[in-house]
Image (cartoon, rainbow, N blue to C red):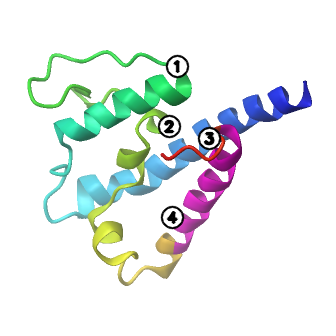
Amino acid sequence: MPGALMHDNGRARLVGLYAQLAAHTEPECSGRCERPRTCCEERYCSIAIEFAKAQWQVDLQPTWHAALPLMGDDGCTAAPHLRPICSAHTCEMCAHGTKRGDAVWTARYYEIMHAIADIEAVVFEGAAR
């Protein structure tokens, strides 16, 4: 049973780490990006729906939004750990691999991402995110 306990603890840690990651990246998306909140696409909702089902056994329900199935009145309705691509995304990181001019922010981003990758390698047995 120790393996199951480690698995459950790993999942709980992932939930927390993805929450931290989303809290870290969201201000970049909503407030500092040249085109705030324009990276959301239907295909990313589809990826999140599939990931949530496959890795977390969670059925995400589409909202009323015609173009973005997981978009609600206050943003995405999926928890950060159920939408890893979205939680990790910032335009700066995708374009440059760093937040230019902010080494501290970038270091924290990679610290969280590496912690997530280490846990996912065990919990998801190496499954791709």
Q: Would you call the spot at circle 4 few (<14 residues within 10 Å), some (14-19), or many (20 or more)?
A: many
Q: Position of residue 22 (x, y in %)?
A: 44, 47
Distance between the alpha carbons at the discs numbered 4 and 1: 27 Å
Q: Position of residue 114 (x, y in %)?
A: 61, 61
Q: What residue is pinned by disc 2?
A: 81
Q: Which mark is residue 57?
A: 1
Going by the image, does 1 lie left or right of 88? Answer: right
Q: Which residue range is magenta in the image?
A: 107-123
Q: Position of residue 24 (x, y in %)?
A: 46, 55
| Disc with the residue nearer the chain's start (2 vs 4) | 2
Distance between the alpha carbons at the discs numbered 1 and 2: 12 Å
Q: Are marks 2 and 4 in contact (CB under 8 Å)?
A: no
Which of the two marks, 4 or 1, is nearer to us in this view?
A: 1
Residue at x 37%, y 19% (from the top left corner): 60
Mark 1 lies on a secondary structure that is loop
Mark 4 lies on a secondary structure that is helix
Q: What residue is pinned by disc 4?
A: 109
| Disc with the residue nearer the chain's start (2 vs 3) | 3
Give the overall secondary structure of the magenta segment.
helix
Residue at x 44%, y 44% (from the top left corner): 84
In this rendering, does residue 9 appear at all? yes
Q: Amino acid at mark 4?
A: Tyr
| Disc with the residue nearer the chain's start (4 vs 1) | 1
